Image (tube, helix red, strand yellow):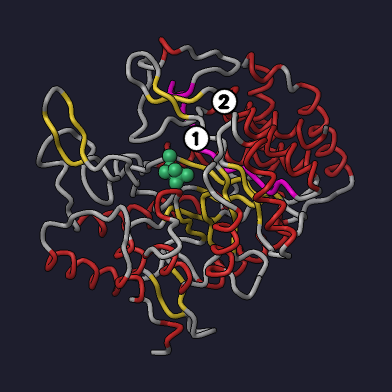
């Protein structure tokens, strides 16, 4: 094996946020089994996504990345996957029209089963147990048994990812993604919801554009199918390494558990295991950057993760918070662009805007989310760089986890349908609202 393909190099370094597996031999057996299972994605597809992200870095495309904060095994149902994909496609069509550029559609799906935690334990009514780290590691239920890390869950995560991705691919290619159908769903949203009514004009314009193309006899393949990619935070390195394979075309390693993987804000240490592991795989990758990120850190990440300055390889997903983005983002973007580094910039307007509501629910205000996206556009416009996309936590269902929106959800309503296994997600209507608002920003 060449040094380049040494995928064990991260094991020498501190790896943050890894579970305390109780039985190393059981972990070893699971890792061996994962190593023998088929890839979930093909390396060629990862390269295709990398090319599309290169267009984003050049300012010629926009990314829409989103899904649950934490997927659950129980949530891998047909309804769930369909509703999520439907909402994502509805958002994408609005953004495509407004931005006049292709929208790269990436789900936070089919692998988003592990969560970094700020505390490794959780205490309720005097009882302290290990924190929930995602279905890939332990159970959500607050019992001693559920909270014990179980390596067999890694296998379950693989199989759950496989069924989810299989269904998402079927929806994306099997007629469900038909452009006119997706537009008809948006028309329902505009006609039937208070949030939607503001966007009648934009929906009418899209309708006219589609009618014009139909009259011209335009019936391209792209009207009926979409490219849909999977992504997750590659947190549990034993899992992602077990699913890393040498691509027979190029002899290079790809993490074939997803098309794109990213490093979270809590695991992006330059001398840490995650950055080391990511430097070895050839997928398109992301790194989350919070408000404390210095330009020097950003440059060092670029040097380590994209030494050849390949466009599409590295995406920075900034998550500053609405009150901080206008202050912190400019220096980062300025220094990185001045260096000539090719990166795509995406805005995660969720993770810098979480707070605890009365009643103890973790929530976010839709207005803060929208404000961070506006700040992101303002900063990039002022610097002449490309606001390359948004990364959101959402679901296609009518949950009550974030406050605000056209069908106003108040802090008192949070208990009605608070279903997330981790962070609060935008519901269907709030997500569509966001897409139309981003479309307006694009046009302004
Ligand atoms: C997440 O994406 O769910 C997450 C934990 O984000 P971050 O790493 O930006 O805090
Ligand atoms: Mn989250």
Looking at the image, residue 16 lies above or below residue 200: below
Q: Is residue 95 above or below residue 185?
A: below
Q: Residues within 10 Å of mark 1 (few under 14, many from 20)?
A: many
**Residue 370 drawn in magenta:** no
Question: Residue under circle 1?
Answer: 394
Residue that label 2 marks: 430
Q: Quadrant of the N terminus?
A: bottom left
The quadrant in which the C terminus is found is top right
Considering the numbered disc 1 on the image, is that residue within a helix, a strand or a loop? loop
Horizontal relation, residue 304 to residue 370: left or right: left
Q: Residue at x 24, y 43 (%)?
A: 120
Task: Please give the name of the residue rendered at 14% of the width and 47% of the height, measured from the top-left corner.
Answer: 148
Total tally of numbered discs in the picture: 2
Dot 1 and dot 2 residues touching (CB under 8 Å): yes
Query: Is ligand 2 within 8 Å of the beta carbon of the residue shown at mark 1?
Result: no
- The part of the chain drawn in magenta is 386-402
Q: Earlier in the sequence, mark 1 or mark 2?
A: 1
Q: Is residue 391 magenta?
A: yes
Q: Which mark is residue 444?
A: none
Residue 83 showing in the rendered view: no
Residue 196: % across, % down: 67, 20
127 sits to left or right of 42: left
| Quadrant of the rendered image containing residue 38 | bottom left
Q: Is residue 232 left or right of residue 307?
A: left
Q: Position of residue 416 (x, y in %)?
A: 37, 15
* Local crowd size for mark 2, using a 10 Å CA cut-off: few (<14), some (14–19), many (≥20): many
């Amino acid at each position: 094996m060449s040094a380049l393909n040494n995928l064990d190099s991260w094991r020498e370094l501190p790896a943050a946020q890894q579970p305390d597996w109780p039985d190393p031999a059981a972990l070893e057996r699971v890792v061996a089994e994962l190593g023998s299972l088929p890839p979930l994605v093909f390396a060629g597809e990862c390269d295709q996504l990398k090319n599309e992200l290169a267009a984003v870095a050049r300012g010629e495309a926009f990314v829409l990345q989103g899904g649950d904060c934490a997927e659950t095994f129980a949530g891998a149902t047909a309804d769930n996957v369909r509703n999520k994909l439907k909402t994502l496609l509805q958002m994408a069509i609005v953004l495509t029209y407004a931005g006049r550029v292709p929208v790269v559609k990436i789900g936070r799906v089919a692998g988003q089963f592990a969560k970094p935690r700020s505390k490794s334990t959780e205490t309720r009514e005097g009882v302290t147990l290990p924190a929930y780290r995602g279905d890939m590691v332990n159970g959500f239920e607050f019992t001693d048994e559920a909270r014990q890390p179980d390596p067999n869950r890694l296998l379950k995560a693989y199989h759950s990812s496989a069924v989810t991705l299989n269904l998402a691919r079927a929806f994306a290619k099997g007629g469900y993604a038909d452009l006119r159908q997706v537009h008809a769903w948006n028309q329902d949203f505009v006609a039937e919801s208070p949030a939607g009514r503001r966007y009648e004009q934009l929906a009418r314009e899209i309708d006219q554009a589609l009618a014009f193309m139909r009259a011209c006899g335009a019936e391209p393949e792209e009207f009926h199918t979409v490219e849909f990619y999977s992504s997750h935070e590659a947190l549990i390195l034993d899992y992602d390494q077990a699913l890393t394979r040498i691509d027979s075309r190029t002899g290079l390693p790809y993490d074939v558990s997803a098309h794109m993987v990213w490093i979270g804000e809590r695991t992006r240490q330059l001398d840490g295991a995650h950055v080391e592991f990511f430097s070895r795989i050839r997928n398109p990758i992301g790194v989350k950057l919070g408000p404390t990120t210095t330009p020097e850190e950003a440059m060092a990440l670029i040097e380590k993760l994209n030494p050849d300055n390949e466009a599409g390889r590295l995406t920075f997903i900034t998550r500053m918070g609405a009150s901080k983005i206008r202050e912190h983002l400019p220096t980062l973007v300025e220094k990185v662009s001045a260096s000539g580094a090719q990166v795509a910039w995406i805005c995660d307007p969720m993770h810098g805007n979480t707070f605890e509501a009365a009643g103890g629910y973790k929530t976010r205000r839709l207005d803060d989310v929208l404000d961070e996206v506006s700040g992101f556009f303002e900063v990039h416009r002022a610097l002449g760089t490309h606001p390359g996309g948004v990364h959101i936590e959402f679901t296609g269902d009518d949950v009550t986890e974030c406050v605000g929106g056209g069908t106003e959800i108040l802090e008192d309503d949070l208990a009605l349908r608070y279903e997330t296994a981790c962070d609060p997600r935008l519901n269907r209507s709030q997500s569509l609202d966001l897409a139309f608002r981003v479309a307006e920003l694009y046009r302004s």
